[in-house]
Amino acid sequence: MRRPLDLFAVLTLTLLCLIWGFQQVALKLAANDIAPIMQIGIRCAFAASVLLPVLLYREGTAAFTDGTLLPGLAAGAMFASEFLLLGEGLERTSAAHLVVFLYTAPLFTALGMHFIHETEQLRPRQWLGLLTAFLGIAAIFVVPDSTQGYSLAGDLLGLAAGAVWGFTTVMVRGSRLTDASATKTIFYQLAVAGVTMPLVAALMGKSDVVLNASTVPNLIFQCVIVALFSYLTWFWLLRHYLASRLATFSFMTPLFGVSFGVILLDEQITPVFLVGAVAVIFGIMLVSWRDKPQPIPLAE
């Protein structure tokens, strides 16, 4: 029986949002020595190599003969596409901008689920949230931004990454993966990204890896803290607490991401972007909150 959030869950969620908010800044900090898409490929390959023995120990080779292989590969391809868009976006726009657009994912998930699942129909409050968020996005795009490190193309790539992430969740919920273990679902995504991202980086001439006193700790953080600790902790929380209550905390991640971008990267925030970002975050809150929480069943 999943339970409402307690102090431990709230503190753990806050820590996860801090990690997820910082990860875009971490990618940006090491971008001069390792291209973001290569960084992501390395961390995904590492995490997948750790999860594979765990998955085989639990389920054996039958883990891939239960009808989840094809949807798992599809989810992995979408996951890799999301991170390709993210990596390319980070090279073109600020981390503050990108984290806001990336975390529009719940909006696209809610919109997609509205059309494929009767129990996920959007209510008036959630439609208002979608409208509010998309008006905030439109405001950011329409008003020119002259701050250094920003580009419209980068922002569009970030928004596209958020859309792919959101629709990946819809695909998972509508396939055999919805009844698969969390470990298996995340393994498929990490494995495909871990194989394809370095190959794409090589084809694009972005496979160079310069290891030094700053990039090594950065990669350790991304591999161990982001790709393993944060993802596994999130799925543990999903197994023990009401999923809809957990989802409402996603608004904290872009807040932390914008703050880290300003503090650590000296990124400039315009008033229009600030207003638009607040509208997006408020819209996410309206869309994610449910009056009667429905837990998401996990088979593990």
Image: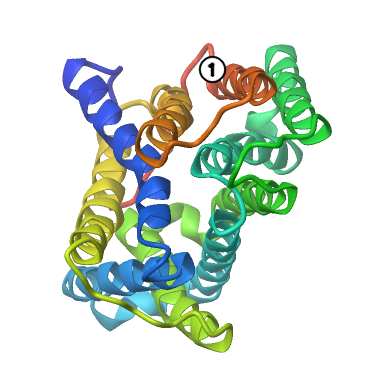
**Secondary element at image label 1:** loop
Q: Which residue lies at the image location 24% right of the left edge and 74% below the top edge?
A: 211
**Apparent side of residue 287 relative to residue 250 in the rendered image (left or right):** right
Could you tell me if residue 278 is visible in this image? Answer: yes
Q: Which residue is mark 1?
A: 290
Residue 1 showing in the rendered view: no
The percent position of residue 260, horizontal first and vertical second, equals 38, 34
- Tell me residue 175's x, y (percent): 57, 59
Q: Is residue 265 above or below residue 67?
A: above
Residue at image point 40% right, 75% down: 194
Q: Quadrant of residue 8?
A: top left
Between residues 56 and 86, which one lies in front from this camera angle?
86
- Judged left or right of residue 277, residue 250 is left
Is the residue marked by circle 1 packed among few (<14), some (14-19), or many (20+) residues within 10 Å? some
Residue nearest the viewer, comparing 17 with 60: 17
| Quarter in which the N terminus is drawn | top left
Measured from the top left, where is residue 39 in percent x and y?
38, 68
Q: How is the image coloured?
A: rainbow
Question: Percent from the top left, x then y, of residue 239?
Answer: 28, 38
- Residue drawn 70% across and 37% down? 146
- Residue flagged by tag 1: what amino acid is it? Arg
Which residue is drawn at the image coordinates 64% and 31% (left, top)? 120
Q: How many marks?
A: 1
- Out of 29 and 79, give the one closest to the viewer: 29
Q: Foreground residue, 189 or 265? A: 265
Where is 245 relative to 75, above or below? above
203 lies left or right of 114: left
> Is 59 situated left or right of 88 in this image?
left
Picture layout, residue 130 above or below residue 231: above
